[in-house]
Amino acid sequence: MDRASFEVLEGEFVAIVGPSGCGKSTILNMIGGLVRPSAGAVLVDGVPVTGAPTARAGPARIGYVFQKDTVFPWRTVARNIALGLEYRGVPRHEVARCVREAVSLAGLEGFEEAFPATLSGGMRQRVALMRTLVVDPEILLMDEPFGALDTHTKLTLHAELLALWQARRQTVVFVTHDLSEAITLADRIVVMTRRPGRVKMVHEVKLERPRDVIALRERDEYAREYGRVWHVLGEEFAG
Amino acid sequence: MTERARIALWRVGILVALLGAWEWLTGIKAISRTPGLYWIDPFFISRPSTIARRFVYLTSGEVRLSLWQMALSTVQSTLWGFVVGVSTGFVAGLVLGRHDRLARVLEPYIIAFNSLPRIALVPLVTMIFGFGLLAKVVLAWTIVFFIVFFNTFQGARAVDADLIHSARFLGAGEPQIMRTVIVPSALAWTFAALTPSISFALIGVVVGELLGGESGGGLGYLITQSLGTLNAADMMVALVSLGAIGIVMALGIKQIERRLLRWRPEYRTERA
């Protein structure tokens, strides 16, 4: 990566798109403190990020939903969602209440005691998302969280994610290689170049909210937005 | 007939055929009416009927040290060796698995000790711990420890880094990461070592008993005693008992494993 610089405003939903290997995930890892930039800095609220988060009480600062399935296979759905609260020493009945709420928000009723191995990929990613949201992070980092899902499941999860975000307005940085996903979800799209990744363009998505993830795709505005970003992104894919 | 019943029937059939052949072949005289001359001499391998009679006798109150007492001694030592070996091996595997430098420093010692044929340790263990329960437990431990250690060590190293990162982002401190990520993750590997461990614990114990004499007791002692009196039937009683003990303990471990690893797809019996 090289001179990749952009800003994310509080409460904003920003998507990062670009060819694979351009360093999209690395940017997230730098924001999360998992990777140190070799030069330059990541500032969150004006303070440089110095490392991975350490245990702390209260709401989380940063929540991270990984591309890979990181639901703990040895814990049931309910106990996966409870993890962050358990780590914070939240009393048991309070944990149970929050978990019930999250389970119903994610439509996972009836699967509370199921182990992840028995769930579909979409349901596992729902668990991962709720597990992250239950500790109420200010910033949500998402690394191609729906990359491995089929189109139908993906759209469902887009709608759910938008609804959850609409209610709470976390600052979201969402990495994807799927431009339609980026346009559906984000306020702004950061387009990266091929390796060495730079910021090629920052595009503002002018689609009003709340958005209907299905109907949206038929509309002319959607096609215009798509065309405009694709024009720029396509150059990166072309030899 | 269900597949299960068919398999069970075959198993019983094979057992009956083997015992029958054994009983029959060891009864055929080489030269008619000459006593003590057999095609296959029961002196060396005994006969099922004799073994059954000895079994009844050895489990009766008429003997000073009954088969039950000997079996109990063997089982007790085996379980102790197993428990001590598994717990120490697990802790050591976890610690070295998470401390790269320590593991690298200790590696040659671990490999050297593990390459040592454990049977060569018997005289030394006997010198230090005598002939009793403790010596047998120590022998079982020297084997079980390493089996569990190596597996847990691998498991602790193979923990998915993204799971650790996830826990960290969810607010876990180091002890919580250990408890909720590394231990459960490594346990799956540890469990794979439990079935061989119980078998090897039994081996360690019997080796100790073979050389331990009467004070060590156990089925191994029955074997050496039978050798002294050239009594193949008693030896067979001891061997069959050891086989039975081995099967029961292995099945017990499988049950525990199934319960604790029920999150794994291969252990799923019902929709959990």
Image (tube, coloured by chain):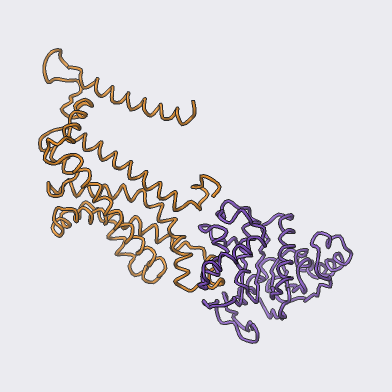
Palette colour of chain A:
purple
Looking at this view, is A190 or B84 the one in front?
B84
> Does A59 sit left or right of B243 as displayed?
right
Looking at this view, is B99 or A131 the one in front?
A131
Residue A14, quarter of the rendered image: bottom right
Q: Is residue B97 above or below residue A10?
A: above
x, y (%) of residue A202?
A: 77, 76
x, y (%) of residue A192?
A: 73, 73
x, y (%) of residue A21?
A: 66, 67
Q: Is residue B30 above or below residue A81?
A: above
> Does A14 sit left or right of B166 as displayed?
right
Palette colour of chain B:
orange
Question: Is residue B166 among what the camera can see?
Answer: no
> Does A46 sit left or right of B59 as displayed?
right
Looking at this view, is B59 or B258 the one in front?
B59
Looking at this view, is A195 or B73 the one in front?
B73
Number of numbered discs overlaid on the protein picture? 0
Question: Is residue B202 among what the camera can see?
Answer: yes
Q: Residue at x 29, y 39 (%)?
A: B244
Q: Is residue B205 above or below residue B185?
A: above
Given the current orientation, which residue lies at the most extreme bottom position?
A46
Quarter of the picture containing the N terminus of chain A is: bottom right
x, y (%) of residue B214?
A: 12, 46
Q: Is residue A239 above or below residue B141?
A: below
Q: Residue at x 48, y 69 (%)?
A: B177
Quarter of the picture containing the C terminus of chain A is: bottom right
Q: Residue at x 35, y 64 (%)?
A: B91
